[in-house]
């Protein structure tokens, strides 16, 4: 039983590492772009959001996200899609009180990163800086 538990633990550990390692080294680096202005509705109140600069840095183990004055970071996982593109999912935090799930797509062809908008936010395309 102890051997089975040990093997199972090693399998889980290696599978979680493999997901992050799955992202090609070409995708690692710094990205920048501009989140377009949009309008959101919360509790029947319409809110106008101005355009903002967005920066994302992807390292081997951590994704860093900056939108305006907000900076978040956290682990990510990557899954290879058709055509060599990758779906990236990150759970980000400011290590205080804010947690945020982010979904991105990395294009092998353009080497761009697209932040997928949710709840009425537009998608945002970022260009690789390095």
Image: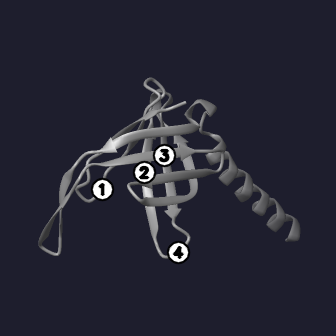
Image side of residue 20 versus residue 73, left or right: right
- Identify the residue shown where x is 61% and y is 52%: 62
Q: CA distance from mark 4 to mark 3?
A: 20 Å
- Judging by the rendered image, the residue that carries numbered circle 3 is 56
User: Counting residues from the N terminus, which is met first, the one under dot 2 or under dot 1?
Assistant: 2
Image side of residue 19 versus residue 34, left or right: right
- Judging by the rendered image, the residue that carries numbered circle 1 is 118
Image side of residue 60 versus residue 76, left or right: right
- Of labels 2 and 3, the one closer to you: 3
Q: CA distance from mark 4 to mark 2?
A: 21 Å
Locate residue 3, reporting x and y percent: 87, 65
User: Counting residues from the N terminus, which is met first, the one under dot 4 or under dot 2?
Assistant: 4
Q: CA distance from mark 2 to mark 3?
A: 12 Å
- Judging by the rendered image, the residue that carries numbered circle 2 is 103
Q: Are marks 1 and 4 in contact (CB under 8 Å)?
A: no
For label 2, count other residues whose C-alpha is less than 10 Å away and answer few (under 14), some (14-19) or many (20+). some
Locate residue 26, reporting x and y percent: 59, 30
- Identify the residue shown where x is 57% and y is 37%: 29
- Identify the residue shown where x is 53% and y is 39%: 30
* SS for dot 2: strand
């Amino acid at each position: 039983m102890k051997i089975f538990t040990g093997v199972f633990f090693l399998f889980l550990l290696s599978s979680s590492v493999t997901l992050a390692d799955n992202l090609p080294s070409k995708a690692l680096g710094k990205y920048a772009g501009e989140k377009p202005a949009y309008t959101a509705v919360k509790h029947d109140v319409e809110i106008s959001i101005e355009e903002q600069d967005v920066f994302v840095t992807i390292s081997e183990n951590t994704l860093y996200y900056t939108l305006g004055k907000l900076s978040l970071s956290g682990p990510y996982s990557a899954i290879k899609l058709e055509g060599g593109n990758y779906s990236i999912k990150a759970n980000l935090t400011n290590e205080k009180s804010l947690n945020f799930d982010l979904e991105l797509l990395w294009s092998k062809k353009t080497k761009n990163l697209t932040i997928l908008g949710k709840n009425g936010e537009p998608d945002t395309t970022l260009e690789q800086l390095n």
